[in-house]
Image (spheres, rainbow, N blue to C red):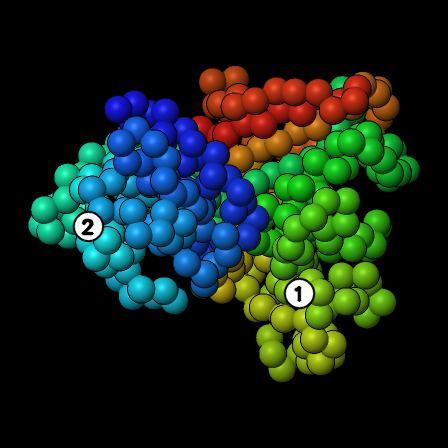
Amino acid sequence: MNDEYYMKLALRLARKGQGYTSPNPMVGAILVKNNRIIGQGYHRYCGTEHAEVNAIRNAGSNSAGATLYVTLEPCCHHGQTPPCTEIIIKNKIARVVVGSIDTNPLVSCRGINLLRASGIEVKSGVMENECRLLNEIFFHYMETGLPFITLKYAQTIDGRIATATGDSKWVSSNKSLVFTHKLRAQHDAILVGINTVMKDNPELTVRNVRGRNPVRVIVDANLIISRRAKVLQNLDKAGTLIATTKKTTNSDFKKIAASGAVVLTCRATNTGRVDLKDLFKKLAGLNITSVLIEGGARIITSVLKENLAQRLIVVIAPKILGTGTEAVGDLNIRRLDKAKLLYIRKIWHRNSDIIIDSRLHKI
């Protein structure tokens, strides 16, 4: 029996839930009996049945004696749905092959131990790296208590995100814009600074692809956002959170809160800006497991300087501007051996643009 073959199929199934399962992980499951797939399923939405349950139900009454392939350790606790271990044991599954251990403290090998105690053969760690990469957001959130941070920006080949006059529409191609909207749909929140809102007045919604709208997070220390800003419109379709240093007693705080947006008071830095680390902790407390940061340059620089990002995506357009706005400002790096290091995961083309998807080395 080729365990890796069936785990690959389970991984492919799991990806179908991308953008819909948060704060739960993406999980796929395949049920095999006599070298034949008899059931398959994946976790579709948070709050609905898990992959294992869907696969067993898809198999009907034929599950006894089968092998279950699942990309993540089956849960053993009651949440919004019953424990998956319960239905696995009840349906007399003979063998369970697990991709990666669930590091949620409520699970963390308890599911595997329970299955083994019930006489079920369990094999774990099959394609573990691939399974962990699939759910890098979930694992980061569980293991650090912080959201997974993705920095994304489009720049010219000489490193500019706008002209000297501030014109930035559009640096990249239309196809790259579609890719950006797909990224938005895959994250719980999208974050920009107040300067970006004032200059571009973006909607920060998903429009060019199918998918859910992320929560819009605006970093606005002094609450200078215009009440007519697009991010304060259509709040029933896309929520907006304003991160500020102002207190609830502030008159502007009350006015913005009355509009329907959530206003969150964060710790201030020595320069009076919003402390991003404190903001990310507060977002994690709101079950926001991932944040896509689209700018501007000041936010991008701060996140890199404070080592707060895990993923960096750069879209490079074949254009030269010369003088203009740099994507990344001063990081106070004076020696080359102190440069931020990246793992390049993937490089590809969208029209004439080059997209680089990387992960930052842990400091």
Q: Which residue is mark 1?
A: 239
Q: Which residue is pictured at 70% across the width and 36% down the height?
A: 179
**N-terminal of the two: label 1 or label 2?**
2
Horizontal and vertical percent position of residue 116: 12, 46
* Residue 249 shown left or right of residue 132 in the figure: right
Pick the front one: 343 or 29 = 29
For mark 2, does the 10 Å Cα neighbourhood hold few (<14), some (14 to 19), or many (20 or more) residues? some
Q: Which residue is pictured at 86% across the width and 23% down the height?
A: 321
Q: Which residue is mark 2?
A: 92
Q: Quadrant of the N terminus?
A: top left
Q: Which residue is pictured at 9% across the width and 50% down the height?
A: 117
Query: Label 1 amino acid?
Result: Gly
Residue 95's disc number: none
* Snapshot quadrant of residue 161: top right
Helix, strand or loop at mark 2: loop
Pick the front one: 158 or 29 = 29
Pick the front one: 357 or 107 = 107
* Snapshot quadrant of residue 351: top right
Q: Quadrant of the C terminus?
A: top left
**356, above or below 93, in the image:** above
**266, above or below 339, in the image:** below
**213, above or below 15, in the image:** below
Q: In the image, which is nearer the foreground, mark 1 or mark 2?
A: 2
For mark 1, does the 10 Å Cα neighbourhood hold few (<14), some (14 to 19), or many (20 or more) residues? many
Horizontal and vertical percent position of residue 75: 28, 54
Horizontal and vertical percent position of residue 264: 58, 68
Q: Which residue is pictured at 52% across the width and 47% down the height?
A: 17
Horizontal and vertical percent position of residue 34: 27, 31
Q: Residue furthest front?
A: 61
